[in-house]
């Protein structure tokens, strides 16, 4: 990473969210920050991208894109007349942990898109163990997340981070001086459901366990780190794992009309 990197900052909570403003200020001491973010909340859209053009307009923080977080990354990297060294996505209000969340989160989706475009990235989220999805977070709630991002960004090409395409970071809002732990996304996932009055009611035990502070995960997982009040850092790669024996012809297959 260069001494003064050019940083593209986006999010999925919308350009007017508190978390992105805190990160913009924190990252401005490290390099040149350009904000390109959705005009409104686009949480949970994953890597959805608009196939037609999206509106973009100047904003007091940078540029507001009438689209998804991935649209914002593409607009910044491909359309703006500047080159970026790194993409940061966040800070999200609420955690992004678990393998099943990686494909759903707009925050993480933006970081994955950056990886496909050849740029290192950090997806950063804030969690509050008492209220996982705080409705009106304060700027102070994002302080640890901002400090963690400041620490990690200059080190993306060092040590355990060097081989990663992006880092998925989850930092507590309610812990003073927490440790930072390298983690893997939790693979725990279970749903319960029933049909009642014409509606399918789903019960996600993953989040219930996290809220209760009672999870079966080991200390090497992101969900356990959140329960323990730690900063979780998962170094991840963009491509999916290759299928064993990819390229081999399946001789036994016999398609008949």
Image: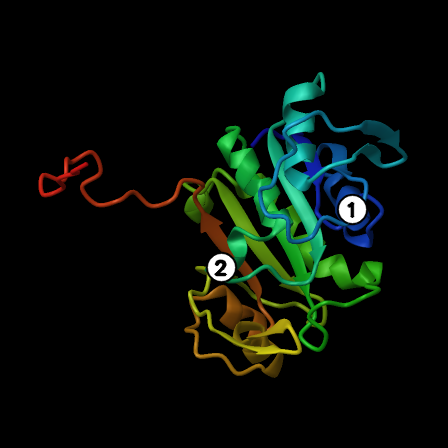
Residue at image point 64% right, 53% down:
44
* Quadrant in which the N terminus appears: top right
Residue at image point 90% right, 35% down:
60
Res. 252 image quadrant? top left
Residue at image point 81% right, 62% down:
140
Residue extending furthest toward the top: 81
Total marks placed? 2
- Per the image, the residue denoted by label 2 is 100
Mark 2 burial class by Cα count in 10 Å: few <14, some 14-19, many 20+ = some
130 lies above or below 78 = below
- Per the image, the residue denoted by label 1 is 14
Residue 123 spot, x, y in % from top left: 60, 48
Q: Is residue 228 visible?
A: no
Q: Is residue 138 visible?
A: yes
Q: Secondary structure at mark 1?
A: loop
Residue 83 located left or right of residue 234: right
Res. 173 image quadrant? bottom right
Residue 59 spot, x, y in % from top left: 88, 33
118 lies above or below 246 = above
Indicate the colouring scheme: rainbow
Mark 1 burial class by Cα count in 10 Å: few <14, some 14-19, many 20+ = many
Residue 139 spot, x, y in % from top left: 83, 58
Residue 162 located left or right of residue 121: left
CA distance for labels 2 and 1:
23 Å
Residue at image point 50% right, 64% down:
222
Residue extending furthest toward the right: 60
* Quadrant in which the C terminus appears: top left
């Amino acid at each position: 990473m260069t001494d003064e990197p050019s940083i593209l900052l986006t999010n999925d909570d919308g350009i007017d969210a508190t978390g992105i403003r805190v990160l913009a200020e924190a990252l401005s001491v490290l390099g040149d920050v350009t904000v390109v973010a959705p005009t409104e909340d686009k949480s949970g859209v994953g890597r959805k991208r608009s196939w037609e053009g999206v509106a973009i307009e100047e904003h007091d923080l940078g540029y507001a894109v009438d689209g998804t977080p991935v649209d914002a990354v593409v607009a910044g990297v491909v359309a703006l007349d500047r080159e970026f060294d790194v993409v940061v996505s966040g800070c999200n209000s609420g955690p992004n942990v678990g393998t099943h969340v990686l494909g759903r989160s707009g925050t993480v989706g933006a970081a994955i898109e950056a990886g496909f475009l050849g740029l290192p990235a950090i997806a950063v989220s804030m969690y509050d163990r008492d209220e996982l999805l705080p409705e009106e977070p304060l700027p102070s709630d994002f302080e640890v997340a901002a400090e963690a991002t400041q620490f990690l960004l200059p080190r993306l090409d060092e040590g355990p981070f060097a081989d990663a395409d992006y880092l998925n970071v989850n930092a507590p809002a309610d812990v003073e001086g927490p440790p930072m732990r390298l983690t893997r996304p939790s693979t725990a996932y279970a749903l319960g459901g029933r049909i009642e009055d014409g509606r399918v009611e789903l019960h996600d035990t993953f989040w219930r366990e996290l809220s209760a502070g009672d999870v079966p995960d080991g200390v090497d997982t992101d969900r356990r780190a959140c329960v323990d009040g730690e900063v979780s850092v998962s170094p991840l790669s963009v491509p999916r794992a290759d299928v064993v024996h990819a390229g081999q012809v399946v001789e036994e297959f016999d398609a008949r009309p």
